Amino acid sequence: MKKVLITLPIIVVVALLGLYFYANQQTENQIDIYIERAIASGAYKDIQYESADFDVDASILISGLRVTDAMDFQYTVDELEISEMDFFNEFPHTINLSARGFALPMGLPALDNSMLTPEMQNFLATFDGSQSVPATINYNHQYDSDNSNLFNSSMSIGLADAFNLAMNTTTRNISYETLSQITDPIAAETAVMNALMNAEIPELGFSFSDFGLVETLLSNQAVQQGKSVDQVRQELISITQSLFLFAPADLQAIVIDLGNDLGSFMEGNKTFNFAIHPDFSGSIQQLQVPIMSAFFAGEYGQIVDLLNIEFSTE
């Protein structure tokens, strides 16, 4: 009996290890299937990775991801973590993605640096492909095909000590499963346009958080213009607060508020929020006629009211 009791834990450990390695193998097989679909869509020419590991919490960590898109633009991702992914549907109904560390092996496209400050040139030089930029991208969505194809998604892009840009979208009546099966680019473009005509976009928003980017940009401008940072800041704030002078009469009130919020944002270390919650639950078909009518009549304030535009700085 003692021998059996000693052997049993060993058997359990071996079984768990076998299950772990089996899960890793199945994970790589599933990832390869998604890569094949991505390349077949025509959006990418090549996608490779160094390793893919399955964790006990059902998350997947892909290391050394190398991507070449249809335009031969190349980029690498140090780590891509996938969690809460729905493997049972060709278009995942749920997924969380988190990417860290980006590099451009071929560097940035040729740019005219004559108008850039030395500091900005040094920053752009970090994209020479020799090292990764510590940027992060997080994305998640939930898709309910049985509830008017309800689709909720959010994405954020951030750079340490610089900024974070977050976006969120809600749509209905767009069959992402159908669209994901179209591989011909021209057919896909036509299908997307047709889908949008029947779509509802009840919510769309973004926020931009400053963690030092504003101060860096102002400092670069101050050096270039031979002024103090505060002088440059006050000049830009004055410009934004004067934007209403160029706005149509029925938009002046909202443009004044926008100028004040942007001016507040330029003080640094603040977040600017923007969102729309359109009438008619965001139905493109129902919004098209009143928006176009208001546009041609010059009633731009009516468009703002139809879209229910909101913004704030905090």
Image (spheres, grey):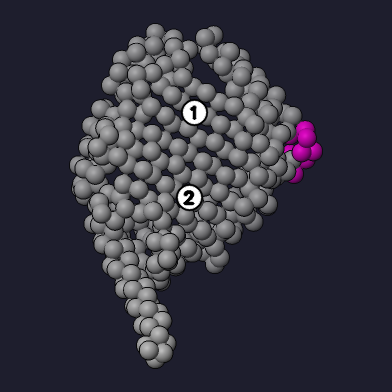
**Position of 219 compared to 105: left or right?**
right
Q: What element carries label 1?
A: strand
Query: Does residue 261 lie above or below 186 as drawn?
Result: above
Give the x, y percent position of residue 2: 41, 90
Labelled disc at residue 66: none
Give the x, y percent position of residue 253: 58, 13
Q: What kind of residue is marked 2?
A: Asn
Residue at figure coordinates x 39%, y 61% from the top left: 58
- Front residue of 103/50: it is 50
Query: Does residue 241 lie above or below 154 as drawn?
Result: above
Residue that numbered label 2 is attached to: 138
Magenta span includes 205: no
Residue at figure coordinates x 68%, y 39% from the top left: 269
- Front residue of 196/94: it is 94
Give the x, y percent position of residue 170: 38, 34
Crowding around mark 1 (Cα neighbors within 10 Å: few <14, some 14 to 19, many 20+) is some
C-alpha gap between disc 2 and disc 1 = 20 Å
Residue that numbered label 1 is attached to: 275
Image quarter of residue 284: top left
Magenta span includes 224: yes
Label 2 or label 1, whichever comes before in sequence order = 2
Report whether residue 189 is seen: no
Residue at figure coordinates x 23%, y 32% from the top left: 194
Q: What kind of residue is marked 1?
A: Ala
Image quarter of residue 297: top left
- Front residue of 3/223: it is 3
Residue at figure coordinates x 76%, y 38% from the top left: 229
User: Residues in magenta?
Assistant: 223-232
Query: Does residue 134 lie above or below 234 as drawn?
Result: below
